[in-house]
Amino acid sequence: MLVYWELFLAFFIPNIIGYGGGPAIIPLIEAEVVGRYGWMNAQQFAETLALGNALPSPIATKMAGYVGYDVAGIGGALVAIFATVVPSLLLMLGALGLLYRHRHSPRVQRMSQWVRPVIAMMMAWLTWSFFNEGLDSAGLLHTLLIGTAAAIALLRFRTHPAFVVLAALVYGGLFLS
């Protein structure tokens, strides 16, 4: 039972005090997993990090799941993942409760009006950076071909985005590897 508490603390503390997302808290997690508890050595942690970076989804939850499973099986993985997710969950529930309580306030309404344009700009910047990365790695022809085919599939044929991503991966595997 003590190992579950240690797993919880090893992932809760870095996630509650870490700022900047997964990559910013990896050194904090390493300090706990390697330095404090000795569940892995530095080489094993580096290999786990490399494996986590190769898979989709947030890095912190993948690291937590792997380390938790390695230390205490399925129960350990569940505890470590829960400890990773709960700080963000609590913060979001608190912020949502605060916003809901003051939803009729003119300040909150003005603030809410700025959220959509900010998100739109962030998504535009993300799209631009993906486009530039595609140009650098695949070239203009492949980038335009994949982008155009994806736009047509999404907008004209209303294809589910998961299938569009899968098709782009298959195309990349066949023609860009």
Image (tube, grey):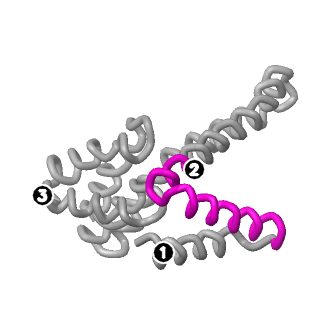
Amino acid type for the residue under numbered disc 2: Phe
Mark 2 element type: helix
Quarter where residue 141 is shown: bottom right
Separation (CA) of disc 1 from disc 3: 39 Å
Q: Do the residues labelled 1 and 3 touch (CB within 8 Å)?
A: no
Q: Is residue 116 left or right of residue 81?
A: right
Q: Which mark is residue 175?
A: 1
Q: Is residue 145 left or right of residue 138?
A: right
Where is residue 13? Give x, y as percent: 35, 43
Q: In this view, does 144 lie above or below 77?
A: above
Quarter of the picture holding the N terminus: bottom left
- Name the residue: 31% across, 71% down: 69
Quarter where residue 161 is shown: bottom right
Separation (CA) of disc 2 from disc 1: 18 Å
Amino acid type for the residue under numbered disc 3: Asn
Q: Residues within 10 Å of mark 1 (few under 14, many from 20)?
A: few
Q: How crowded is mark 3: few (under 14 residues within 10 Å), some or many (20 or more)?
A: few
**Is 136 contained in the magenta span?**
yes
Q: How crowded is mark 2: few (under 14 residues within 10 Å), some or many (20 or more)?
A: some
Q: Which of marks 1 and 3 is in front?
A: 1
Q: Mark 2 points at which residue?
A: 131
**Is 143 contained in the magenta span?**
yes
Which segment is the magenta one? 130-157
Provide the major secondary structure of the magenta segment.
Answer: helix
Amino acid type for the residue under numbered disc 1: Phe
Q: Mark 3 points at which residue?
A: 41
Where is residue 132? Give x, y as percent: 53, 46
- Name the residue: 16% across, 47% down: 36
